[in-house]
């Protein structure tokens, strides 16, 4: 692996990607400029997200989760795509990027206009019932929770990387149940401790198989759900470019590693490659 520092030119990265069909894999680092913190960036505060097993175990855990998520939702809905998201859209429209696989659940790639997109871990804007499987918009649930908890969480709170507000006391929060069967509602995202649906993984593997380069942006690759695609590309001899602040778990597999910010890298790349 060759590491390219911020002070060096992007010429090697441009040359490697130029003329190749690229699949991009994005992580939380691409959304930090939109005001959504990440878990493992250099300045991130260590946090322990709720696991799926914890969530389904007790009503108190569900109460705690939905109280924090309800307050944090106001922040998430105010986030907008940043220059890095728009640069990937420009690369897609220019025929450079075939598809984007994102580990993020924030919906910012969709908001920017990305057409070929796989939300690997789901979308926080959707809600699923663990009983009957019904899927409903998060906005509708937010309105129901507002009705059940008028004025709850007014004020400013720190926001966790998954969009939850950091609340200490949640025992007075009233949780909504599925309107169809009364079952437990969960955001339609893959929690820690859950597996990504197999058909979704298979689709991503097919995209990586068809790519001539894999571009990783803003991911530390600490979880296997993303790292496996880097391993797949490297095993096939497909060039891998990683753009991320700090080390990643895939650095040893990368053809090029750029230790830099997402927007400051993608914007000039888009200007050159999409011209």
Image: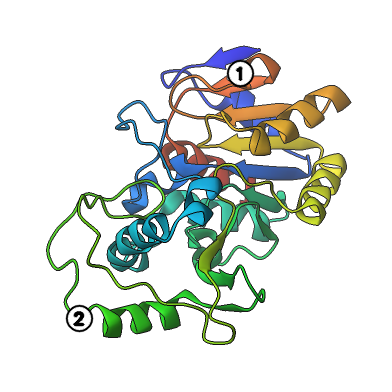
| Quadrant housing the N terminus | top right
Task: Give the structural element (helix, strand or loop) at label 2.
Answer: loop
Q: Is residue 50 above or below residue 243?
A: below
Question: Where is residue 164 shown, x and y percent of the image?
Answer: 34, 55
Q: Is residue 271 left or right of residue 140?
A: right
Q: Is residue 6 left or right of residue 113?
A: left
Q: Residue furthest left?
A: 155
Nearest to the eye among marks 1 and 2: give it.
Answer: 2
Question: Where is residue 161 shown, x and y percent of the image?
Answer: 38, 46
- Counting residues from the N terminus, which is met first, the one under dot 1 or under dot 2? 2
Identify the residue at horizontal 32%, vertical 32% (top origin). Answer: 44
**Can I make out residue 124 in this image?**
no
Q: Which residue matches tag 2?
A: 150
Identify the residue at horizontal 67%, vertical 31% (top origin). Answer: 227
Q: Is residue 164 left or right of residue 214?
A: left
Front residue of 5/160: it is 160
Task: Give the structural element (helix, strand or loop) at label 1.
Answer: helix
Mark 1 and 2 residues: CB-CB less than 8 Å, in contact?
no
Q: Which residue matches tag 1?
A: 251
Identify the residue at horizontal 66%, vertical 44% (top origin). Answer: 24
C-alpha gap between disc 1 and disc 2: 48 Å
Front residue of 250/263: it is 250
Question: Where is residue 243 shown, x and y percent of the image?
Answer: 54, 30
**Can I make out residue 143 in this image?**
yes
Identify the residue at horizontal 79%, vertical 30% (top origin). Answer: 233
Q: How is the image coloured?
A: rainbow
Question: Where is residue 86 shown, x and y percent of the image?
Answer: 50, 57
Q: Name the quadrant containing residue 123.
A: bottom right
- Give the crowd class for mark 2: few <14, some 14-19, many >=20 residues within 10 Å: few
């Amino acid at each position: 692996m060759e590491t390219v520092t911020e002070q060096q030119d992007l010429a090697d990265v441009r040359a490697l990607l130029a003329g190749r069909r690229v699949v991009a894999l994005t992580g939380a680092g691409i959304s930090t400029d939109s005001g959504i913190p990440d878990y493992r960036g250099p300045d991130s505060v260590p946090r322990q997200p709720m696991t799926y097993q914890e969530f389904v175990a007790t009503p108190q855990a569900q109460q705690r989760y939905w109280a924090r998520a309800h307050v944090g939702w106001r922040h998430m809905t105010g986030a907008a795509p940043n220059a890095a998201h728009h640069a990937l859209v420009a690369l897609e429209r220019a025929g450079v990027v075939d598809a984007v696989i994102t580990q993020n659940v924030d919906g910012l790639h969709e908001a920017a206009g990305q057409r070929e997109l796989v939300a690997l871990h789901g979308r926080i804007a959707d809600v699923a019932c663990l009983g009957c499987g019904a899927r409903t918009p998060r906005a509708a649930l937010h309105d129901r929770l507002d009705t059940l908890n008028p004025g709850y969480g007014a004020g400013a709170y720190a926001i966790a990387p998954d969009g939850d507000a950091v609340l200490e006391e949640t025992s007075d929060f009233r949780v909504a149940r599925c309107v169809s069967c009364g079952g437990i509602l969960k955001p339609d995202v893959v929690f820690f401790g859950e597996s990504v649906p197999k058909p979704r993984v298979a689709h991503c593997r097919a995209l990586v198989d068809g790519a001539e380069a894999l571009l990783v942006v803003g991911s530390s690759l600490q979880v296997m759900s993303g790292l496996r695609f880097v391993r797949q590309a490297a095993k096939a001899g497909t060039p891998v470019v990683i753009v991320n602040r700090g080390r990643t778990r895939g650095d040893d597999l990368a053809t090029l590693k750029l230790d830099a910010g997402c927007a400051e890298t993608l914007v000039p790349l888009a200007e050159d490659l999409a011209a």
